[in-house]
Amino acid sequence: MKHRTFFWFFLPTGLAMLLFIAAPIVSVVMQSVFAPHEAVFETVENCGPFGCKEETVINQDATRALREAEPLGRFVGLDIYFDRGHLAIAEVGEAWRGSDSMGAFFDRLGNLPFYRAIGFTLTYTFVTVPLLILLGLMIALAVNSLHRHLKGLVIFFSLLPMIVTPIIGALILFWMIDSRGIIGNLIIYLSGDPTLSLKASTSLMWISIIIYGIWHSAPFAFVVFYAGLQTLPKDQIEAAQIDGASRFQQLRFVVVPHLMPLVTFVTLIKLMDNFRVFEEIVGFNAQAHATSLSWIIFNDLSGETQQLSSAATTSVLTILGVAILLSPVLVRTWRDFRGRAH
Amino acid sequence: MASKAQTMPAGLRLLTSAFIVIWLIMAAFPFLWTLWGSFKVELDFFSIADWTNALTGANTKDTYGVPFTGAGYEGAWVENHFWRNVINTFIICFFVVCTSLTIGTLGGYALSRSGFKYVFWLLIIALIFRAMPPITLVAGYMLPFFEWNVWGILPTAIIVLVAINQPFTLWMLHSFFQNIPKELDESAKVDGCTQFQAFRHVIIPVMWPGVITTGLFSFLLAYNDFAVTAMLLSESNRTMVPQIAAFLGTTYTEGNVMFAVAAVVSATAPLFVLVMFFQRQIVSGLTAGAVKG
């Protein structure tokens, strides 16, 4: 295809991405290094019948003029990145010097909003991903051994947790684990503690969200692995059987290696997806116990006063985090592309 | 044909069946439970005294004389005008899917037919865009949209969702078009067609399976979106998902959780229908990316 033809074919989609993805990124980076102007104060002498006194008032005209002259705000460089709401360099340094053990250090780190969010996001991501892969693999193996007529039905029901809107799925589960809901009731009955409430305990809330995450994402792993099982080479399985491999050995040495590229694929996709954990927190109403970077951005933006600079700074930090997680995928794609070119 | 060596021992068969049943209950039970409970009063859905109330609807019977009530649905759809949000959602989904497929097909086709190096870089950029949480972009939209006075209206949300959708659409359609033999449009070009004519008369008739699959995922993205629609739409233009989130803020205080429950069931129903009719396409779409690597 000629460059010219390519250009015209690609123009609409390229323009959409340029204007509504690339440009906002630039805008976000800009906003993160500028802070809104402070109001211009001036001292005026106010003379009344009881003498004169000095007052400090906001000079509306000057403030507006300043805001119009520099609509971006005042340049603050990386100040917002280092303030208490974000990387909190000063506080981290103080915590490092002030605590005598690692445990105490992490405790104090957990009080800073950014590190609290990072802590939950990383825990969530790295606990959910291996477990959902394991569950997905087990479902795939079990479904694969089913009778052909049953498979369609099982796949239908298995797709539901994945397809449902995340916030709605979270709400459905949240209502069930409510202390008056069915699972909440069951847990209270099992533990014998009538005051037990999942909502009140941070660790139980984390576990609930993680279980939700596994429930929501396992079907994706299942579908991918199930497709992989369909291409399993029969002769290798038979050869293994003739060699006297047990069922488990066949699984361990033939099936799993065959699925390994798919495991990598699911891991990478789900690492990226789970890093954005956000709707779950809104659905579970869990912000008191668990926050994530995306949730901080949402919270900054949806308040009465929109804290654009703060939200933009967290956005940039999130994008950097995604970039780090993404780098293995990029390297892999690069290798694939090189391989195809040769 | 399963050989004798491949048939499972009875114990393992039993274990597998039990596991499947447990998984099915895990996957489907929450939905059935909420559907059943949405026809009850709050005291039954959240029963302190006796959990079987949620099944039998004892309190619902006391209030309405029958164990089922549509009060939650009435409260959501009539009193709180949930139908408006439903209409907004479907307007958004329709236009997002149409626009995103139109420009995505052109772009994906071009990417699959051009062998130059920039194709790779465009795909890599699209991959990076795909990985970014949409909410990180929202801070960048706010100021310009307020400035141009386009914040809060449906077309703005549609364009933003289309753009956010593009990276995924491009990847999907790119790999799909690569599976359509190049010889098809090459021969049309030899016969004197321009590239666009070749696309129109040769590729468009055979591209529908891939386009439908991609369209399904575009629909799901628009339908399930919360971050963008919650931030970029004014209250009167809200779609279903942010409206449900907004219900929660107010209903917990008013004691009308059942409105939210009814709204949740209403919003899940279209997805059920979708999976029922397009199960095969969804499965093939999910695996397409994986098999290609």
Image: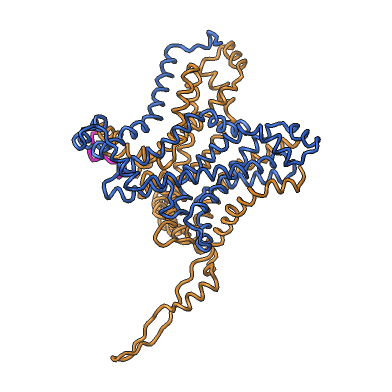
- Location of residue A37 with respect to B134 vertically, above or below: below
Q: Is residue A199 magenta?
A: yes
Give the residue displayed 52% in from the left and 70% down from the top: A74
Q: Is residue A317 visible?
A: no
* Quadrant holding the N terminus of chain A: top right
Q: Is residue A19 left or right of residue B50?
A: right
Q: Is residue B202 left or right of residue A306?
A: right
Colour-to-chain, orange: A
Please report the bounds of the magenta region as a residue range. A192-201
Q: Residue A184: x, y in percent?
A: 29, 36
Mostly what secondary structure, the magenta segment?
loop
Q: Quadrant of residue A41?
A: bottom left
Give the farthest residue toward the left: B62
Q: Residue A244: x, y in percent?
A: 56, 11
Give the residue displayed 65% in from the left and 38% down from the top: B174
Q: Looking at this view, is A176 or B282 the one in front?
A: B282
Q: Is residue B71 magenta?
A: no
Give the residue displayed 44% in from the left and 40% down from the top: A165
Specify how the rendered protein is coloured. Answer: by chain
- Location of residue B85 with respect to A84 vertically, above or below: above
Colour-to-chain, blue: B
- Location of residue A294 with respect to B177 vertically, above or below: below
Q: Looking at this view, is A109 or A184 the one in front?
A: A184
Q: Looking at this view, is A110 or B31 the one in front?
A: B31
Q: Is residue B288 left or right of residue A138?
A: right
- Total labels: the figure holds 0
Q: Residue B217: x, y in percent?
A: 54, 38
Q: Residue B117: x, y in percent?
A: 73, 44
Q: Is residue A70 visible?
A: yes
* Quadrant holding the C terminus of chain A: top right
